Amino acid sequence: MNETITPRRFVSKMDSDIPKHWLPGNEFVSSLLNAYTILVPANEGFYVRTLKECMPQLHDQRLRERCAKFIHQEAQHGVAHVRYWENLDDQGYRFRVFERNVDKLVFRTMEKLGPLWLRVSLVSCVEHINAYVGHEFLSQNVLADADPRIKDLMEWHFAEEIEHRRVAFDLLQHMAPSYPVRLLGFALTVGLFYLLMGGQAIALLRQDRLLWRRKTWTQIRSHLGAGHHMLRRTLRHLLDYLRPGFHPSQMADDTMAEKVLTRLAATAPPTVVATGRTQRKAWEQAA
């Protein structure tokens, strides 16, 4: 298996002059990814807590090391997106109550009621969604005209989701390799994921008084249809996950992700930096 996972920090500043609609001419995609960024920290927190709970049961040292690096990457995603929330606050968006309710009613409730094997299945499915979202946004260069600060944030996140896309699925195969377990995680995850992200995107557009504008619906049709073909591509990726012989390595995106991460590390000043060995060791021990 050719897999290299490098924990990194996103170090670029989220300056106060970032525009509300940071993808010019496409307020819908700006709002959709703003909704994504609002959901990221609670999502990532759920992943981190779930994998940490799995650690005592992992006797495969290589899988333990991969899970520790996954935990570190996901925690850094949460930190970076929370920094961007200050910009959303400054722009007048109201989302904090929604975010807290999602964390409490979805993720914390699942932790209390759901067995560990089921939570791992949920993480595996959402990680597949994150990886293919990253694949589509990077391969189609959807964010080419975006404000460079948000473009860097999103593309770093997407590239790392591709980089560690195998980990949660391999963990599921270790903890609960039953195909019905994978199906159950899929059934509980997919509808809720799109309901939360789509609902929050609509809420942001309503706050901007753009929801019922004809141009907004033209943007939605373009994103889902002839422009980015996201509806058709999403259905294809979801069906891939349901194939009995599926494995995330079949999405051969490592080179694309590596190019993005290399570019972001090479900027002056760098956008992302690999975390030091001492910090990584501390994370691995904590995990």
Image (cartoon, rainbow, N blue to C red):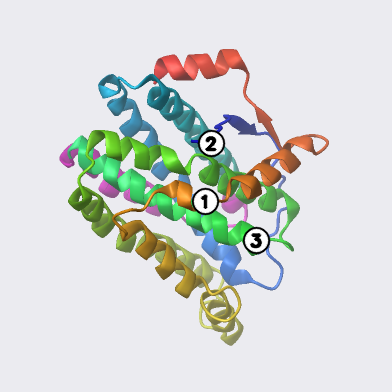
Q: Which residues are magenta?
A: 87-114
Identify which residue is drawn at 71% across, 68% down.
24
Mark toward the start of the polypeptide (2 vs 1): 2
> Residue 248's spot in the image, x, y percent?
43, 48
Which of 50/32 is in front? Answer: 50
* Location of residue 126 with respect to 71 vertically, above or below: below
Identify whether 118 is placed above or below 66: below
Give how far apart the Cα atoms at labels 2 and 1 are.
29 Å
Which of pointers 2 and 1 indicates the residue nearer the eye?
2
Q: Where does label 1 land, which residue?
A: 37
Q: Position of residue 49 (x, y in %)?
A: 34, 31
Q: The disc labelled 1 sits on which kind of residue?
A: Thr
Residue 2 is marked as: 2
The CA distance from mark 3 to mark 2 is 40 Å
Q: Which residue is mark 3?
A: 20
> Which element carries disc 1, helix, strand or loop?
helix
